[in-house]
Image (cartoon, rainbow, N blue to C red):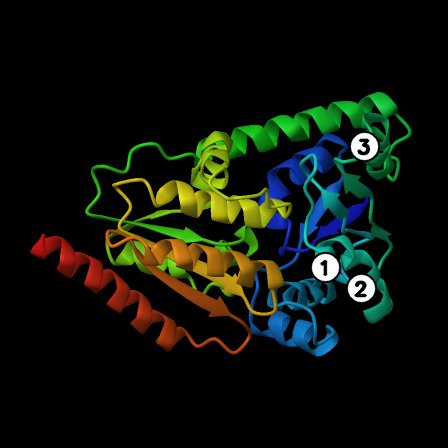
Amino acid sequence: MSAKVGIPKSLLYFYYYPAWRKFFEELEVEIVESQTTNKSIVDQGVKLAVDEACFPVKVCYGHLMELREKVDYIFLPRVVSVTKKEYLCPKLMGLPDMIKNNIADLPPLITPTINHNQSWPAQLKANLEIGYYFTDSKLEILKAHWQAAQALKKHRQQLLKSNLANNEVNIAVLGHSYLLYDDYMSLGIIEKLEELGVEVVTPENLSESQIEQGASKLTKDLFWTFNKKIIGAAYYLFNRAEIDGIIQLAAFGCGPDALIGELIERQAKRRSDVHFMTLNLDEHTGEAGLETRIEAFVDMIKWEAKRA
């Protein structure tokens, strides 16, 4: 009987799950995902997490509680850096320690340190550390790692969008993947926009070169990888004639989100042809108010297009 590894359906799940799934499948490990975010998960997370945690981190606590009785291990890597000379949020770096000190009676946590600022041998050691829980074969682990990297590459290529010219309204929705693609946290904003006849563009629909092109307009490098991706997408899309509006989803309690939100808004005020709106999300955000703001935003864009 194979071991069961739990993966919380939150935070870095939305960036790297295709790779994680492929890695464990290659090692014949059974994967158990937590449920899709719901009110019970959010309530549990908010109750357990420290007040200073941002909304997505609080939700992660709830996902871990949902997995607690179902698995032999929980996969919760300590991700420091995924790009040279850049870093992730300190709360993501310290997440395993926060969890260990706030939730009792969890299954053993698999918490390898992923840090692309380290040497290649150190990165290899981290990958091997994960696999050694399930096999002694270094070759099998390396093969699984390679297959995982290919799966992630293929997944990201499938998300790219190139042609936006033929759509009536194109709106970019920018934010962390764990906000955009968690329908409970985002209140289903992407689906709601599509129901209004909008073609939605997210940072995942842009290539790395397009993100870098946008980020190059900053006066200095931004060392938070995921926030750089968001602001790079915003600055790139501000110069695309097909984009009619940009909506930034920001997590309450996230300092980097607040910083880049200010920078994006300043840039938006210089543009008369691209509408901009920021939506801050937390456990108290109401769906009715969000729908009203979205509908008004889209109606304004369509009305101005008819006047032009």
Label ID, residue 220: none
Q: Residue furthest left?
A: 307
Q: Is residue 178 left or right of residue 73?
A: left
Return the mark for residue 123: 3
Residue 301: where, in percent of width, then height?
21, 58
Separation of residues labelled 3 and 2 (CA atoms)? 23 Å
Tag 1 residue? 91
Disc 3 packing (10 Å; few <14; some 14–19; many ≥20): some
In this view, 259 is above or below 296: above
Q: Where is residue 61 drawn, in percent x and y?
A: 71, 66
Say what amino acid the circle numbered 2 marks.
Met
State if disc 2 and disc 1 touch (CB < 8 Å).
yes
- Comparing marks 1 and 2, which lies closer to the viewer? 1
Q: Which mark is residue 98?
A: 2
Residue 39: name its quadrant: bottom right
Q: Amino acid at mark 1?
A: Lys
Name the residue rendered at 20%, 38% in the picture. 166
Disc 1 on helix, strand or loop? helix
Q: Earlier in the sequence, mark 3 or mark 2?
A: 2
Which residue does the image show at 47% across and 32% down from the upper left? 207
Q: Residue furthest right?
A: 136
Q: Does residue 159 lie above or below 303 as drawn?
A: above
**Residue drawn at x 43%, y 39% as measured from the top left:** 205
Query: What is the distance, in whole Å, between disc 1 and disc 2 at their CAs?
Result: 9 Å
Residue at the image point whose x is 50% and y is 69% from the top: 281
| Residue 119, percent from left and from top | 82, 29
Dot 1 or dot 2, earlier in sequence: 1
* Residue 62 quadrant: bottom right
Q: Relative to residue 76, is residue 239 drawn left or right?
A: left
Q: Is residue 296 left or right of residue 264?
A: left
Judging depth in this view, the residue of 107 and 54 nearest the camera is: 54
Q: Residues within 10 Å of mark 1 (few under 14, many from 20)?
A: some
